[in-house]
Image (cartoon, rainbow, N blue to C red):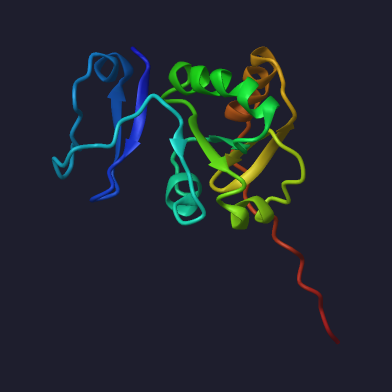
Amino acid sequence: MPEAQLIRCPVCGATNRVPLEKIEQGLAPVCGRCKNPLPVSIQPIKVTDATFSADVERSPLPVLLDLWAAWCGPCQMISPVVEQLAKEMAGRVRVAKLNVDENPVTAERFHIRSIPALLVLKAGQEIDRIVGAQSKTEIVRRLEKAIQQPQSTPQSTPQSTRR
């Protein structure tokens, strides 16, 4: 089966499987349910404080979130790697970029103190953090580990009993 990208319809919310080869050919996919055009990109998506919930927390795929700033040299060094990963892992991982200077709320939420920082998230929950410029091989290794990790459920806390 050819690789596919999972794309959530912004109109009806349906998750659509779109073959990556069709996207690369420049074809415009439509939602299988409501027939509206689907947003397609094999580039990292730009995330803001306002769009974080929709783009990251509700993603049907694990998300690699690149937290960066324009003035950060190491951030500029790993940017091409992040863009390569967006294309190579389309359909398996959603790749997003968040400028920490323009979006301080999300950066503070995740206690970002050093950049570049790459967060791996599932259902909006951080499952791994890569700080500093790392090799593509190391980033891929950590992503593969995260993809294979089962979705965790919140642990129930035992109720205390009173007498």
Residue, far bottom = 163
- Looking at the figure, which quarter contains the C terminus? bottom right
Give the answer, above or below, for where 126 lies relative to 75: below
Total marks drawn? 0
Residue, far front = 71
- Looking at the figure, which quarter contains the N terminus? top left
Q: Nearer the viewer, residue 27 or 79?
A: 79
Give the answer, above or below, for where 55 lies relative to 117: below
Q: Nearer the viewer, residue 149 or 58?
A: 58
- Residue sitting at 32 percent across and 18 percent down? 20
| Percent position of residue 12, x then y | 24, 50
Quarter of image, res 79: top right
Residue, far left = 35
Q: Is residue 54 left or right of residue 40?
A: right
| Percent position of residue 104, x then y | 62, 54
Q: Is residue 148 left or right of residue 1?
A: right
- Residue sitting at 61 percent across and 46 percent down? 100
Residue, far right = 163
- Residue sitting at 56 percent across and 52 percent down? 103
| Percent position of residue 25, x then y | 23, 14
- Residue sitting at 50 percent across and 49 percent down? 57
Q: Is residue 28 left or right of residue 54?
A: left
Give the answer, above or below, for where 110 lies relative to 134: below
